[in-house]
Image: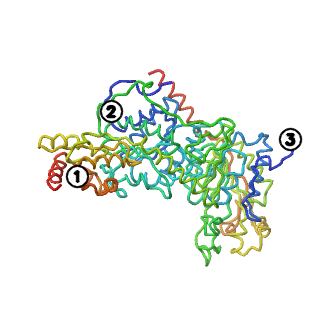
Amino acid sequence: MTKGANPRTYFWQGNEACVEGAIAAGCRLFAGYPITPASEIAEHLASRLPQVGGVAIQMEDEMASLGAVVGASWTGAKAMTATSGPGFSLMQELLGYAFMTETPCVVVDVQRAGPSTGQATKCGQGDVMQARWGTHGDYASIALSPNSVQEMFDLTVRAFNLAETYRTPTVLLADEIVAHMRERIVVPPQHQIEVLNRRKPKPTEKEFFALEGVAPMPSVGEGFNVAVTGSTHNEYGHRFTADPAVHRRLVERLVGKIRNNARKLMDCECFNTEDCEVGIVSYGCTSRAVFEAVEMAKARGIKAGFVRLKTIWPFPDNIIQNLAENTKVVIVPEMNLREVFYEVERAVHGAVPVVSVNKVGGSEMITPEELVVEMERSVKKS
Amino acid sequence: MTETFTIRRYLRDMTLPFCAGCGCVTVMSCFLRAVHELGYQGLRRFVFCSGIGCSAWIPSPYFEADSIHTAHGRSIPVAAGVKLMRPDLNVVVFGGDGDIAGIGLSHLVHAARRNLDIMVVMVNNMIYGMTGGQVAPTTPLGTKTTTTPYGSFEHPLDTTRLVVAAGASYAARWTTAHGEQLKEAMKKALKTRGFAFVEAASPCPTAFGRRAGFKDAAEMLTWFRENSVPLEEADKMTERELAKKIVVGEYVSREIPTLTDNLYKMLREAEKSAKKD
């Protein structure tokens, strides 16, 4: 059986790299609904999955897409869907179901400019909070933010690994620019790619919704007689809605299994954060302008550093706090009208000023020049 | 059949949640009898999916089997995900008219169109029972409900006919007053290759009957019996004569290639061509 792409260097589009990352991670079902700028993921998987014994199906809408993903995951398969903001909104219903039932799966959200239909073919970064708080109730989410074609591959693999490890849906929060650009990418040999799988129960086990941590997950059709429900349930998966203690225990565990492992989940690229006058916190496509801006600032005598969020949720409070301790001002550039900014402000907690650089409009990225202007202004003020 | 049927054999040791006179118990019993008469030893080869509503509780968590109790209206997509990856398992969906013909209607139509090889049992009580008796897409015109206090002013949906038009392999409608026919229809649905749909008109004395002027469940069953028209007779009647009637019988039973037949044929070819490359 054909496995993942041959290990070598490719010149791929971000969405294509995501597809090959998914296959390398063991994804065997894709269910999705067409939407720009994520459709290439559906198209490439429709071609690639049958070659590795997997299934790709186009469903009637986004609810059905994530529904089929959830069903497939309970057969033991690794499964994913891909969408953009409007579809991601529709998926929030079953995303909540996946959180509640602890169903591992991956949702790729290639962000575009919203709200609503917005600019369908243009870039935005406005779904950061939707990836954290989009569905109702108490839960904690995992969202990863790639900024290159290479990371579209690498972080897709990681998204599957985290989904399997923590028995939770994970979000690959990409954006139109990273998803549509073409770059050099190196696919490592399969044996060098870490692939993690959910823990399976022993034949005698009966608690699939444990009282603590992450329980083993049976598949349907194996004789476990597993009961899965989106209602509040006890450790056996049986609906148990009347007892406040049962609900409290369940949602505190759902939040706790992410929150208590936040340090392990955090993943940031840090540059010069120990000694800088100005620190930039960025993610996704916007971070690509930051590298150059830091170099340009250096030439103008400004000591700059940056933190790039590869994991957005859970938010790396301690890394941002560490940056704030070593800099005079923090700048947060985003292609939205402030989302991660507020998280940074919360983490910095007044230690230094936090300044936002925002650009919406879709076709225009934040440029290194614009960042340097803000860096000079902020350093002067501080 | 040498073994006698005992419903307890298929159920977890739990108290059922249904109101007195609820048709869900009849539907549950008909289904499990059908399973028994087809010679299945327990429910090991089955996966049950359901959504939100009273009838979603028929399998979940009461059946001693794998059951996935999904979000409202999404039982069919989840069942699709299970069936696509495990075509060897019998995947059965239970749902009410609100779940299947209301919020989840597009999934029903598309599952029938694809001829997805699952069985869907729609328990049609013509009301949103669990939420207290609001008008449903299946509520007969003129019926008083909590959200149509002056009588419903909408035409109800003929879900079974819709499923036939969409391309299902099997579709039948009976009422819980027709236990034997309902059970036989379920047996046939279980044996069907492809999408099989069984609609069971079912009394909800608590949320429907009470406001619609029925004294109790027995009166509702009498109403079902007296207003049911066999399909063959209905063909000779006018639309006006058929208003407020329940047309019962087997609507379709046909062989059409199923979704998983087509899919796995394609997959074998794709794997072959991938090997050649």
Can you identify the residue that label 1 sits on? A329
**Mark 1 closeness class: few <14, some 14–19, many ≥20 residues within 10 Å:** many
Q: Nearer the viewer, mark 1 or mark 2?
A: 1
Q: Which residue is mark 2?
A: A12
Residue name at image x 58 percent, y 70 percent: B154
Callout 3: SS: loop
> Residue B26: image x %, image y %?
77, 57
Residue at screen point 63% across, 59% down: A241
Q: Front-most of B181 and B120?
A: B120
User: Mark 1 falls within which chain?
Assistant: A
Q: Is residue A76 left or right of residue A359?
A: right
Task: From the image, tell me which residue sits under label 3.
Answer: B1
Location of residue A120 with respect to A219 vertically, above or below: below
Q: Nearer the viewer, residue A61 or A343?
A: A343
Mark 3–mark 2 Cα distance, whole angstroms, equals 62 Å
Dividing the picture into quarters, in which one does residue A232 lie? bottom right
For this orientation, the residue located farthest to the bottom is B150
Q: Residues within 10 Å of mark 2 (few under 14, many from 20)?
A: some
Which residue is at 76% across, 59% downward? B176
Establish if A107 lies above or below B27.
Answer: above
The residue nearer to you, when weighing B130 against B144, is: B130
**Secondary structure of residue under mark 2:** strand
Question: Which quadrant holds the C terminus of chain A?
Answer: bottom left
